Image (tube, rainbow, N blue to C red):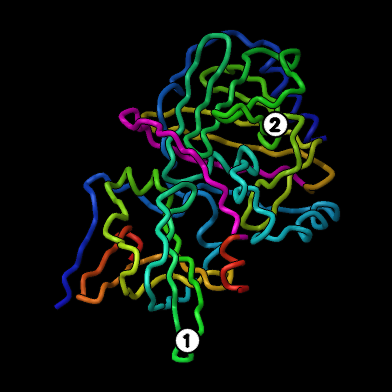
């Protein structure tokens, strides 16, 4: 059974969506998963994000930008991205972006089965 | 005719701009998605909308407010309203915006935008505003807008001639804002938006320190 690392808070807002641009406009409802290694973590406004490097069997690298809410929104919920270490192998799952190779993060699963869910109410 | 009547009613209210006390002061958080009236664009409005590319033209990509309605309708970011007796100061955590609106009539209106960020950059997209009380409502009228987008998701435009009227009313711990956009060149009929906020006086505004969110750096990664 997976260990669920549920970073939540008792102060969850009535709804949490992306701060600076409309999540529904910029991301489809299609849920996708991408495996890769963490190249960069940006805990900032207007969007926190994780850059994943996905390398296929032929060695071709594709970078995926995995976006989340704003830093201030996440901080207000008691969420940080400290758990996301550069070089970690992960599988990210979320809503496929209308912009190529982008996703709105729902969860990140680590190799040991740990799952990081920054915004539990989105799931 | 309707537009003139509506503006006339608002102007009547502002003309008698007595200093009153409302309870809009405090910190507020958007509560729910709000409502919007039917959007009927003129041919010019449709042309502006068709020119808009969400993935490239959204002003938010450059830490710029697309419009006052876009800034009001942002979830998760507190908004603090202060009444000083001579002006209304609205602090939006989003983009660190500070909007200072003189209380009075149209004569208080200047060409300078009412909104700047903490770095001192002014944003015409938020318009130039003046405010008055009408009963227990606070009414803000804004003009002199820079081109922008009332709805960034669909490219609903605003232009320099657009007039925006925000009516703020408090009932209990709920702030309701009725935001009416009037512009016969782009709307067949006024666009009316409603937002609802819950009181959140225990929430501190943080420094937003916006970092440009354009995707050029990312696109270059995959282009190589």
The residue sitting at the left extreme is: A1
Q: Same chain for marks 1 and 2?
A: no
Name the quadrant of the N terminus of chain A: bottom left
Assess disc 2: are there few (<14), some (14-19) or many (≥20) residues with their C-alpha within 10 Å of its C-alpha: many
Name the quadrant of the C terminus of chain A: bottom left
Q: Chain of mark 2?
A: B
The magenta span reads B189-216
Say what secondary structure mark 2 lies in.
loop
Assess disc 1: are there few (<14), some (14-19) or many (≥20) residues with their C-alpha within 10 Å of its C-alpha: few
For the residues carrying marks 1 and 2, which lies nearer the camera in this image?
A: 1
Which disc, if any, is residue B200? none
Mainly helix, strand or loop, the magenta region? loop
Question: Residue B192 location, x and y as percent?
Answer: 64, 42
* Mark 1 lies on residue: A59
The residue sitting at the bottom extreme is: A58
Placement of B72 over or under B187, stated as above or below? above
Q: Chain of mark 1?
A: A
Q: Is residue A41 magenta?
A: no
Spatial CA distance of label 1 from label 2 is 52 Å
Q: Image quarter for residue B204?
A: top left
Which of the two residues, B55 or B80, is positioned nearer the viewer here?
Answer: B55
Placement of B127 over or under A106, stated as above or below? above
Q: Image quarter for residue B3?
A: top right
Question: Residue B158 location, x and y as percent?
Answer: 74, 43
* Mark 2 lies on residue: B127
């Amino acid at each position: 059974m997976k260990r669920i690392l549920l970073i939540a808070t008792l102060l969850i807002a009535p709804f949490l969506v992306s701060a600076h641009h409309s999540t529904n406009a910029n991301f489809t409802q299609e849920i996708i998963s991408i495996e890769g290694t963490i190249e960069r973590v940006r805990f900032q406004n207007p969007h926190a994000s994780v850059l994943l490097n996905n390398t296929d069997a032929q060695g071709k690298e594709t970078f995926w930008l995995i976006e989340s809410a704003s830093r201030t929104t996440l901080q207000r919920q008691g969420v940080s991205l400290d758990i996301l270490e550069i070089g970690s192998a992960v599988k990210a799952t979320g809503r496929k972006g209308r912009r190529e190779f982008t996703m709105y993060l729902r969860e990140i699963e680590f190799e040991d089965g740990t799952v990081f869910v920054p915004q539990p109410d989105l799931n | 005719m309707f537009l003139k009547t509506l503006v006339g009613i608002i102007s009547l209210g502002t003309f008698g701009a007595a200093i009153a006390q409302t309870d809009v002061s405090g910190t507020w958080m958007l509560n729910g998605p709000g409502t919007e009236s039917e959007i009927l664009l003129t041919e010019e409005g449709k042309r502006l909308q068709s020119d808009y590319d969400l993935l490239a033209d959204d002003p938010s990509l450059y830490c710029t407010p697309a419009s006052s309605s876009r800034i009001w309708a942002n979830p998760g970011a507190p908004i603090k309203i202060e009444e000083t007796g001579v002006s209304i100061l609205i602090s939006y955590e989003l983009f660190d915006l500070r909007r200072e609106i003189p209380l009075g009539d149209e004569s208080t209106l200047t060409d300078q935008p009412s909104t700047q960020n903490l770095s001192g950059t002014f944003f015409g997209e938020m318009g130039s505003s003046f405010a008055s009380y009408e009963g227990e409502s606070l009414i803000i009228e804004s003009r002199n807008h820079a081109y922008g987008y009332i709805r960034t998701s669909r490219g609903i435009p605003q232009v320099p001639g657009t007039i925006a009227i925000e009516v703020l009313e408090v009932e209990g711990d709920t702030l309701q804002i009725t935001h009416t956009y009037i512009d016969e060149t782009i709307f067949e009929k006024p666009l009316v938006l409603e937002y609802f906020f819950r009181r959140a006086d225990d929430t501190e505004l943080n420094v937003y320190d916006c970092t440009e969110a354009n995707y050029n750096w990312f696109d270059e990664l995959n282009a190589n």
